[in-house]
Amino acid sequence: MYEVTIKKSFSAAHILKEIGGKCEDLHGHNFVVEVTVKGESLNKEDLLIDFRVLKGWTNEILEQLDHKYLNQIDIFKGMNPSSEQIARYIHDRLTDNMKSMDLKVSRVTVWESENARVAYYDD
């Protein structure tokens, strides 16, 4: 089994309702996102996936989130735009991009600070 991981970042603001504390106030993060893709075989170029392709797909997704107030984005309507929800959204979008490939999104990790992260993955 092979794995490829890329790391990207974006900045955004959000409010997390009904959790108590300061996070119920408007605040922002410089999020760091790690995307790991796995697969059993390499392509004809002897790559699992070209880093540029994976970075491009991830950039397209993050562009929708970068420098935004996440509570006002349609994809997060009716929910807290938590790091958990962000990780799942990125995972699901990347999974859609890989349907025609023999690859799987192994894990999406979202860091909201250098000492706090969440990860989302399918079993």
Image (cartoon, helix red, strand yellow):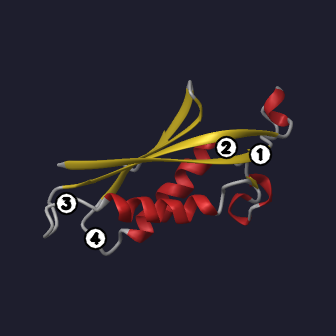
Tag 2 near tag 3, CB within 8 Å: no
Seen in the picture, residue 97 relative to 123 is either above or below; the reply is below
Residue identifier under label 2: 82
Q: Spatial distance from mark 4 to mark 3, Cα to Cα?
A: 13 Å
Amino acid type, residue under disc 1 in the picture: His
Q: Residue at x 27, y 61 (%)?
A: 49
Residue farthest to the front, as pictured: 52
Return the disc, 4 or 3, that comes first in the chain's sequence. 3
Q: Do the residues labelled 2 and 1 touch (CB within 8 Å)?
A: yes
Q: Which of marks 2 and 3 is nearer the N terminus?
A: 3
- Disc number at residue 14? 1
Percent of width and height locating residue 27: 80, 38
Q: Distance between the residues labelled 2 and 3?
A: 33 Å
Give the mark nearer the N terminus: 2 vs 1.
Answer: 1
Residue 96 in percent (x, y) is at 44, 69
Q: What residue type is labelled 4?
A: Met
Classify mark 3: helix, strand or loop.
loop
| Vertical placement of residue 121 versus 62, above or below | above
Task: Quote the CA–CA distance across marks 3 and 1.
Answer: 38 Å
- Provide the residue designation for mark 4: 101
The answer to whether residue 20 shows anywhere in this view is no
Q: Distance between the residues labelled 4 and 2?
A: 29 Å
Q: Under tag 2, what secondary structure?
A: loop
- Label count reads 4
